[in-house]
Image (cartoon, rainbow, N blue to C red):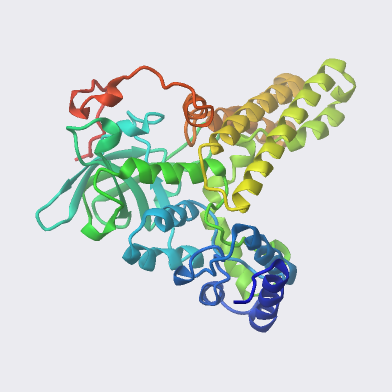
């Protein structure tokens, strides 16, 4: 058996790219070639479009795609979480149906977890799925804060299928068709002016029997895989990246990629502001003259140290995963660190700009970007699991501290007091 090395992988993928790459082909057509050759997701099993390569060698493939200026697979939006989850828990027929199209970008996805009465307490979900004699599941209820639901083809749905067991045990995970008549989607306008999120109403929506992911009542374990990859903030599946930046390149494939990014990434365009825009701090301090204020300089130094420490921690985590380590609860460390950095950045921006930081649009600093930072930063402490949830995960699953005293988690869910049950609109 020939040994697989960095040099051999680099030589093979470089030769293949030189023989097959061209900017005048269609985007899906090119990605189909990547999948067929195994370069679309090189760490995946060969059966699903990969090459069974160790994670460390996926970076080599990515480097060669970027070197030649090629476009990579679709790795934006929720589709990456869908691919990671189905790869880990999906049945073969589900992988056959969905994985390839997640790489080519032909399907758009959304994640249907949060509800009006169960945001941080995900296990308290009350959207219900009832099984009919023919094996189909009928879904009724409501989800909220669902990114990209307004243009999604498929949704990752966590629904309650058993009310007579402790709440974590009564959940089941499904793939649901978002284009069917029983699904109603309404966009939500945020206070920062964007409309990234949606509320979704299910009224007798149908899920075929073969769209159940994992086991009945096993939805919590499947959802945990999705959330771990979300908190990691990376693809989680070892697929190659997006390749060359298409913004200044000419050719049919770049035009199609630009159109794809404009659609899929539109809900995320305010995310840099949500993260605090640390990159603008020194620029703003110099422009305003606050760089000479010793108090401001001290706060800037604290922020930059915090941001750099978080960055290094994230790099170490990625390196461990690249070496083959499993995705674990350590991702919560990075999620919690990001919240600290974002809030610290908002404070420093306010210290630098003063009351002007509240001015939006062209009247405000950085054409209103600083004002957008201030009203967007709180979201980073909520999305993907609140800071409090992350602290619980870190204490119990990373530091191995004792769990909190038993609560309603251990009681049958039908007996647990709850404020509001997500119901369909009729």
| Residue 372 in sight in this render | yes
* Placement of 220 over or under 336, stated as above or below: below
Position of residue 30 measured from the top left corner of the image (x, y, whole percent): 56, 75
Image side of residue 220 versus residue 79, left or right:
left
Q: Nearer the viewer, residue 110 or 413?
A: 413
* Placement of 386 over or under 210, stated as above or below: above
Q: Nearer the viewer, residue 3 or 31?
A: 3
Image side of residue 138 versus residue 56, left or right:
left
Occupied quadrant, residue 121: top left
In the orientation shown, which residue stands out farthest toward the right? 292
In the orientation shown, which residue stands out farthest toward the bottom? 19
* Placement of 249 over or under 238, stated as above or below: below
| Residue 208 in sight in this render | no
Residue at 49 percent of width and 22 percent of height: 401
Position of residue 229 measured from the top left corner of the image (x, y, whole percent): 50, 46
Q: Which quadrant would the N terminus be assigned to in this image?
A: bottom right
Residue at 37 percent of width and 46 percent of height: 222
Residue at 62 percent of width and 33 percent of height: 338
Residue at 55 percent of width and 37 percent of height: 330
Position of residue 262 measured from the top left corner of the image (x, y, whole percent): 57, 57
Image side of residue 261 versus residue 210, left or right:
right
In the orientation shown, which residue stands out farthest toward the front? 1
Q: Which quadrant would the C terminus be assigned to in this image?
A: top left
Count of numbered circles on the image: 0
Image side of residue 344 versus residue 90, left or right:
right
Position of residue 102 measured from the top left corner of the image (x, y, whole percent): 46, 62
């Amino acid at each position: 058996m020939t040994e697989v090395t960095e040099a051999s992988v680099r030589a093979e993928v470089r030769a293949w790219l030189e023989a097959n790459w061209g900017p005048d082909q269609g985007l899906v057509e090119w990605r189909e070639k990547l999948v067929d050759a195994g370069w679309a997701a090189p760490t995946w099993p060969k059966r699903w479009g990969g090459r069974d390569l160790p994670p460390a060698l996926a970076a080599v493939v990515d480097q060669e795609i970027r070197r030649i200026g090629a476009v990579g697979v679709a790795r934006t939006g929720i589709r990456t979480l869908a691919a990671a989850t189905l790869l880990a828990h999906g049945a073969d027929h589900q992988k056959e149906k969905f994985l390839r199209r997640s790489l080519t970008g032909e399907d758009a996805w959304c994640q249907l977890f949060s509800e009006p009465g169960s945001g941080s307490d995900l296990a308290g979900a009350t959207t219900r799925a009832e099984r009919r004699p023919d094996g189909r599941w009928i879904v009724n209820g409501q989800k909220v804060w669902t990114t990209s639901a307004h243009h999604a083809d498929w949704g990752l749905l966590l629904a309650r299928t058993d009310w007579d067991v402790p709440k974590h045990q009564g959940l089941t995970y499904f793939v649901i068709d978002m284009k069917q008549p029983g699904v109603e989607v309404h966009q939500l306008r945020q206070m920062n002016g964007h409309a990234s999120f949606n509320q979704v109403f299910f009224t007798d929506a149908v899920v075929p029997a073969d769209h159940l992911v994992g086991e009945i009542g096993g939805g919590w374990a499947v959802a945990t895989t999705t959330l771990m990859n979300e908190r990691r903030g990376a693809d989680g599946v070892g697929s190659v990246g997006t390749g060359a930046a298409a913004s200044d390149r000419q050719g049919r494939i770049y035009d199609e990629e630009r159109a794809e990014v404009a659609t899929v990434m539109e809900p995320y365009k305010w995310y840099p502001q949500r993260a605090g825009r640390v990159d603008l701090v020194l620029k703003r301090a110099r422009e305003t003259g606050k760089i000479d204020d010793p108090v401001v300089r001290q706060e800037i130094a604290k922020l930059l140290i915090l941001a750099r420490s978080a960055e290094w921690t994230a790099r170490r985590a990625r390196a461990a995963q690249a070496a083959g380590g499993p995705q674990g609860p350590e991702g919560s460390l990075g999620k919690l660190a990001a919240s600290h950095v974002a809030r610290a950045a908002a404070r420093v921006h306010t210290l630098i700009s003063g009351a002007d930081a509240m001015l939006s649009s062209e009247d405000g600093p950085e054409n209103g970007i600083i004002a957008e930072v201030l009203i967007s930063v709180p979201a980073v402490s909520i999305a993907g699991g609140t800071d409090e949830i992350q602290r619980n995960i870190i204490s119990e699953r990373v530091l191995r501290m004792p769990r909190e005293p038993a609560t309603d988690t251990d009681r049958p869910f039908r007996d647990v007091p709850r404020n509001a049950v997500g119901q369909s609109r009729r």
